[in-house]
Image: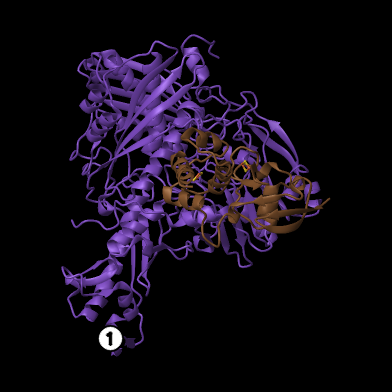
Chain colours: A brown, B purple
């Protein structure tokens, strides 16, 4: 039986009819057409689907959409400011942190939460911070560099 | 040679801007109007005959549009491997899209197309299947015995392929040896772990024309195999090139079950059909083959090989797929060609079992070979008291030597020695006896490993496609569109190809754009993105197309500048007489002239033009490269082994690679860093595991299949690129991609030995194996 959920996504309020078993990821991708969050495993193992849920980085494949009623979601599509990439997105491009790019939106959302706490971040803290996001292309080095560049320059 | 404007300078990737903003261009995002979703019913038994299959209840479920059973699928045997002609004699044609005989857990048995994925999934539960179970065998050595269950009819001892090569006189070589070493080295089944699942949409229209979009590594291979399986002419299949895919690494180098199943369901329903594999389905679709390598090696006390014998047993699982080819690449590039020796014999066995099938994975047989050969060299050096760098240099080839695989070529650029020497210098390599040792429970050690011979494509390999094509079209704003069939798996090859075109055309890299739309109808044939071949092979084709476009550009510019085209050059987007860059005209103005009406409006008023100038400025090429130059590689690592927990931590990694001319430094570093992660995962943690009784996959997700996260990785991976000029390469370049993955495992194994003094000859080197080797745990 479908139920109505109200969620705010990237500043827009949506009313969505969803099945109880539908994940937030499914609703974002298949109902709202936001393809930034990626399905890499559908089981909480890869992090490609990471979004911010009320400011917290979550695996959207592991969140039942009904439990997100009334929440605010940010996907990678919601980061650009006035049509310009935000500093973290630009840092990923410039550091060479993007290869196939499939992990990138999730990685950026996790790093967004990490950077939001305002503390200085050293290499180890960044590595532990992104340990829930897998990348098979980059060996993570340039991803760590990108996050560090933003942490240093803010 | 004049200084390069573009080559050798890090270029930012065009696609990265789009990928950080969301990433639209992946096959996983493709949707067609009216599209159905299909799911696949897979066998629960490792070996069985289906005696009854009844889908009546599934068909009645509301929302189900079609069910596909073995009787509905063509019973035409095929090999799914993309890069060979479908009926190539070297490949084994032993697969069916759907069969009533299942040979591994997870083999497709039926499929359902429905209006939603959830309905399709629910319908699978309603299909009733009765099996007659057959005897099983999971161990390839048991499968080779006379009394083993037969997995394919007419294949005695389950041996799908048995190549053997002999050079010189092995017995004589062993007679000349001062020492003989024997050892057995085993590797495990690992998955490429591309992040984007295998996914496709297939649409068959009312005239039977098939359009396919898929996450895969070879446009033309998919067209050829799918047309073969469906028994229709190739020209009726149009494969659309994805702007990008979410990784491949060899794991998408063959026709999946999903494309033919989706095509058959689309034919049945008249609607587009999409299939996305779950991560479990991906894990059982393709893997690097486990190979058990037995080595017997003779050396003199001065450290010269006198005889080398190798025997390799490859577990190809239920079907041959890549196994019949991997075994040969493994034999040649993993063993026979690595170090010269007069007396060598190698034989390989590709053996059927009731395990999952294998596939491509960066290195294609070489990682298994390198683990054996490079580990054994370390054992030899330990025994005869020789430094492993010195040993390798005594047994190596040099620039100018004949190419050992293609004797008609020479090693025209080859810097193996420099890889070892510069790598050692940067790493700070010291002889074993001079190393400082700690007394605490955490032991440090260093190790090295090499891949002395590798490929820049497949030229010279029998049965393997090796040619590329490109189209370069200049625009009136001075930019160029570059159309190629080769798919960027994520490595950044598009940027490299843009750099090559830009350098040749004399325009900026930002001015070269790879066309977003291309398909098998519009671009020239290309072999797959595999075998470390794109920079070299496709790069040569791109350069050829750019040269052709430039020739035409200079002809038109010649009429405008009243100069002989031979005297003109293009730099920074302007055409001018050589040596006087201040005069001249922009590339855009030349294109505008070529595409103008006969009277062109210019700043100085209307100007007449001539017929000879007219036409789009375009260059096309389709060619095989002139050679197959070998790169060379050396990897150095330092590890710390915790003798209490068995944990191995990588402290440092230095990688030295001879790649000819370096085109994009940042892109090349990315290959090395990502390659190290894959090699390190292979060395220490990754392993697909299966229930020994019923063959079910025990590691079907990333919680159970462990690959390195950012935390386990060494804090810095250092890349050293040894440059030279490969005369047949585009601007002197050859290859990089695969050796990055091949060498980490043996280097790590050698470092673990250096640290704790025990040798582990079975990957992965888990804490349990370390503790067992130290006598602190019962080995199981
Ligand atoms: S798709 Fe959600 S964690 Fe992998
Ligand atoms: S860039 Fe490919 S998985 Fe991270």
Q: Position of residue B406 (x, y in %)?
A: 26, 42
Question: Where residue B774 appears, x then y in whole percent?
Answer: 46, 11
The residue where tag 1 is placed is: B610
**Residue B72 seen by the camera:** no
The answer to which of B32 and B151 lies nearer the viewer is B32
- Residue B172: in sight, yes or no? yes
| Residue at the outermost right position | A1
What is the chain letter for disc 1?
A: B
Q: Is residue B660 above or below residue B749?
A: below
Secondary element at image label 1: loop
Which is more toward the observer, B144 or B577? B577
Looking at the picture, how far across and down is residue A99, in whole percent? Answer: 46, 48
B341, B653: nearer the viewer: B653
Residue B40 pos. (x, y %): 67, 45
> Which residue is at the far top?
B775
Residue at 62% in and 31% down = B697
CB at disc 1 and ligand 2 closer than 8 Å:
no
Q: Number of callouts in the render?
A: 1
Q: Residue at x 62, y 65 (%)?
A: B205
| Dot 1 crowding, Cα within 10 Å, few <14, some 14–19, many 20+ | few
């Amino acid at each position: 039986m479908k139920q109505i959920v109200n969620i705010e996504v990237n500043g827009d309020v949506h009313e969505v009819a969803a099945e109880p078993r539908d994940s937030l990821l499914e609703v974002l991708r298949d109902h709202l057409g936001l393809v930034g969050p990626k399905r890499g495993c559908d089981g909480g193992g890869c992090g490609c689907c990471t979004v911010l849920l009320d400011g917290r980085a979550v695996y959207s494949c592991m969140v039942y959409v009904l439990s997100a009623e009334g929440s605010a979601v940010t996907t990678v599509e919601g980061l650009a400011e006035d049509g310009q990439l935000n500093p973290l997105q630009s840092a990923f491009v410039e550091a060479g942190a993007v290869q196939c790019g499939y992990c990138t939106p999730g990685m950026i959302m996790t790093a967004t939460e990490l950077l939001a706490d305002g503390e200085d971040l050293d290499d180890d803290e960044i590595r532990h911070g992104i340990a829930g996001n897998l990348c098979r292309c980059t060996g993570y080095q340039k991803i760590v560099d990108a996050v560090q560049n933003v942490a240093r320059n803010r | 040679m004049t200084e390069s404007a573009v080559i050798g300078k890090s270029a930012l990737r065009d696609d990265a801007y789009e990928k950080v903003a969301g990433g639209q261009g992946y096959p996983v995002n493709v949707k067609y109007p009216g599209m159905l979703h299909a799911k696949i019913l897979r066998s629960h038994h490792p070996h069985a005959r289906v005696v009854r299959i009844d889908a009546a209840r599934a068909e009645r479920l509301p929302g189900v549009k079609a069910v596909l059973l073995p009787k509905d699928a063509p019973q035409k045997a095929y090999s799914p491997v993309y890069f060979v002609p479908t009926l190539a004699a070297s490949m084994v044609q032993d697969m069916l899209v759907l069969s009533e005989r299942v040979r591994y857990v997870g083999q497709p048995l039926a499929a359902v197309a429905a209006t939603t994925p959830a309905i399709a999934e629910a319908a699978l539960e309603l299909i009733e299947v009765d099996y007659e179970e057959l005897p099983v065998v999971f161990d390839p050595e048991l499968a080779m015995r006379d009394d083993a269950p037969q997995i394919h009819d007419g294949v005695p001892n389950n041996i799908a392929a048995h190549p053997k090569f002999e050079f010189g006189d092995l017995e004589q070589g062993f007679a000349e040896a001062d020492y003989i070493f024997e050892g057995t080295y085993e590797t495990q089944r690992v998955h490429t772990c591309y992040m984007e699942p295998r996914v496709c949409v297939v649409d068959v229209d009312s005239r039977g024309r098939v359009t396919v979009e898929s996450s895969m590594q070879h446009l033309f291979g998919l067209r050829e195999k799918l047309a073969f399986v469906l028994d229709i002419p190739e020209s009726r299949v149009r494969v659309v090139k994805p702007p990008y895919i979410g990784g491949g690494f060899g794991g998408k180098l063959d026709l999946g079950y999903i494309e033919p199943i989706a095509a058959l369901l689309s034919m049945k329903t008249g609607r587009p059909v999409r299939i996305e594999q779950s991560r479990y389905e991906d894990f059982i679709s393709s893997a690097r083959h486990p190979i058990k390598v037995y080595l017997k090696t003779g050396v003199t006390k001065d450290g010269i090989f006198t005889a080398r014998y190798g025997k390799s047993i490859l577990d190809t699982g239920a079907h041959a797929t890549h196994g019949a080819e991997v075994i040969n690449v493994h034999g040649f590039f993993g063993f026979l060609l690595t170090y010269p020796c007069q007396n060598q014999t190698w034989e390989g066995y590709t053996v059927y079992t009731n395990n999952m099938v294998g596939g491509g994975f960066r290195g294609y047989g070489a990682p298994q070979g390198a683990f054996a050969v490079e580990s054994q060299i370390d054992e030899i050096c330990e025994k005869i008291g020789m430094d492993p760098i010195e040993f390798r240099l005594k047994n190596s080839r040099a620039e100018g030597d004949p190419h050992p695989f293609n004797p008609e070529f020479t090693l025209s650029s080859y810097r193996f020695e420099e890889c070892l020497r510069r790598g050692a210098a940067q790493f700070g390599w010291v002889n074993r006896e001079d190393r400082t040792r700690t007394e605490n429970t955490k032991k440090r050690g260093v190790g090295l490993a090499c891949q002395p011979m590798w490929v820049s494509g497949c030229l010279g390999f029998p049965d393997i496609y090796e040619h590329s094509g490109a189209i370069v079209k200049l625009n009136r704003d001075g930019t160029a569109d570059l159309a190629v069939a080769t798919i960027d798996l994520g490595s950044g090859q598009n940027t490299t190809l843009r750099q090559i075109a830009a350098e040749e055309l004399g325009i900026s890299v930002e001015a070269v754009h790879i066309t977003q739309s291309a398909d098998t109808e519009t671009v020239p044939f290309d072999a797959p993105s595999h075998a470390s071949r794109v920079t070299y092979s496709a790069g040569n084709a791109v350069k050829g197309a750019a040269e052709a476009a430039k020739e035409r550009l200079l002809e038109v510019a010649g009429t405008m500048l009243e100069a002989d085209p031979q005297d003109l050059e293009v730099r920074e987007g302007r055409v001018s007489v050589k040596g006087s860059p201040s005069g001249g005209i922009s590339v855009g103005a030349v294109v505008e002239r070529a595409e103008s009406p006969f009277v062109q409006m210019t700043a100085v008023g209307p100007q007449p033009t001539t017929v000879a100038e007219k036409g789009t400025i375009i260059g096309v090429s389709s060619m095989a490269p002139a050679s197959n130059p070998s790169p060379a590689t050396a990897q150095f690592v330092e590890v710390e082994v915790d003798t209490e927990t068995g944990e191995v931590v990588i402290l440092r990694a230095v990688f030295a690679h001879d790649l000819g001319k370096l085109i994009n430094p940042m892109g090349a570093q990315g290959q090395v860093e990502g390659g190290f992660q894959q090699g390190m995962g292979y060395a220490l943690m990754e392993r697909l595991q299966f229930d020994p009784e019923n063959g079910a996959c025990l590691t079907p997700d990333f919680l159970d299949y462990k690959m390195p996260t950012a935390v386990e990785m060494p804090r810095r991976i250092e890349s050293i690129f040894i440059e030279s000029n490969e005369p047949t390469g585009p601007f002197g370049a050859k290859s990089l991609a695969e050796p990055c993955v091949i060498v980490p495992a043996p280097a790590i194994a050698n470092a673990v030995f250096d640290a704790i003094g025990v040798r582990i000859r079975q990957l992965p080197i888990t804490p349990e194996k370390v503790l067992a080797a130290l006598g602190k745990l019962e080995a199981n």
